[in-house]
Amino acid sequence: MDRSESTLALVDFEQTEFDDCSSGYGSSQDLSDSEAVTANDTFDTPDREHVGPTSRPTNSILNTRIGHWTSSDSMSFRNTQTLTEHLRTISYISQLCDVIFEVGPEKVKVHGVKAILGTRSRVLYNLILKKQKEQEFKGKTHKKDKKKKTSSIFQNDVLITVQKYQPEDFRKIIEFIHCGSVDINSSCLAGLLCGASQFGLDDLEKACWDFVNYCVKNGTVLSLLPSAKRYCNFKLGQILMEKIFCSVRRTVTV
């Protein structure tokens, strides 16, 4: 058939039928939106600026990959950048969420969607099921108590108390689980590292250690110490502190 003149970025239908499948539990590694096209160049690709690993696309065409028409006159289109932004937004809209985390002594509320949380983390899946059963049991126990005040949360919401995390750090963990991306810096590094280990987010844990090694090489590893001290009750928090001190000692010795 004739070549399409549309500027929409297309993907090979047969090639992408299974390439986005994840293993279920554990966080899947998303394909970079700026990845070079590996499909046959049936279309002439439009001119574009170079997009580095940390730069943001300047054109909507860069948010997708380019493929070609299949022999069955069908095509596949995806815009992962928009999907990521929408999934990130969900956790900030309480009406769209059905899990409430109360974090820290002040019980700061962080919201999530149990379908996403349970799919991405087996630990959260089991925790959510456990809390659901506990709430159902309590609901049956107090069913005959007509004078009992109604709960401030929706009937189907799951309420989970989180004691050991800083609210902003835990919010970033939930953000990563929802949309697969998060900004790592020295102030949240330890919280993300401990959360990644606890909830089985192997790719996030690896990214955190990569950031630690980056700080070691650039001589800024001491900037991670305040964050590590906040999570010294975690095993990985202690390991992180040891790594920081060992790096400093090597630097002094040299």
Image (cartoon, grey):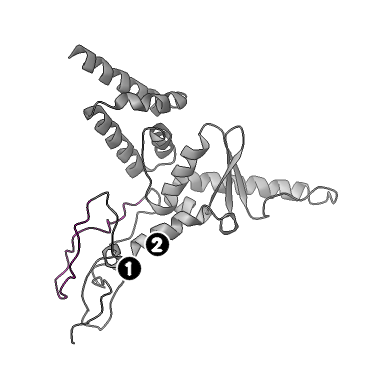
Badge 1 amino acid = Arg
The residue under label 1 is: 78
| Residue furthest bottom as drawn | 1
Circle 2 — which element? helix
Circle 1 — which element? loop
Return the residue nearer the eye: 41 or 251: 251
* Horizontal and vertical percent position of residue 162: 56, 37
Q: Which residues are drawn in magenta? A: 28-52
- Which circle's residue, 1 or 2, is located before the other in the chain? 1
Badge 2 amino acid = Leu
Q: Is residue 238 above or below residue 69?
A: above
Which of the numbered marks, if any, corresponds to residue 23?
none
The residue under label 2 is: 83
Q: Is residue 113 above or below residue 48?
A: above
* Residue at screen point 34% across, 52% down: 28
* Horizontal and vertical percent position of residue 224: 36, 27
| Residue furthest right as drawn | 147
* Horizontal and vertical percent position of residue 191: 43, 34
Q: Main secondary structure of the magenta part?
A: loop
Gap in angstroms between the C-alphas marked 1 and 2:
9 Å
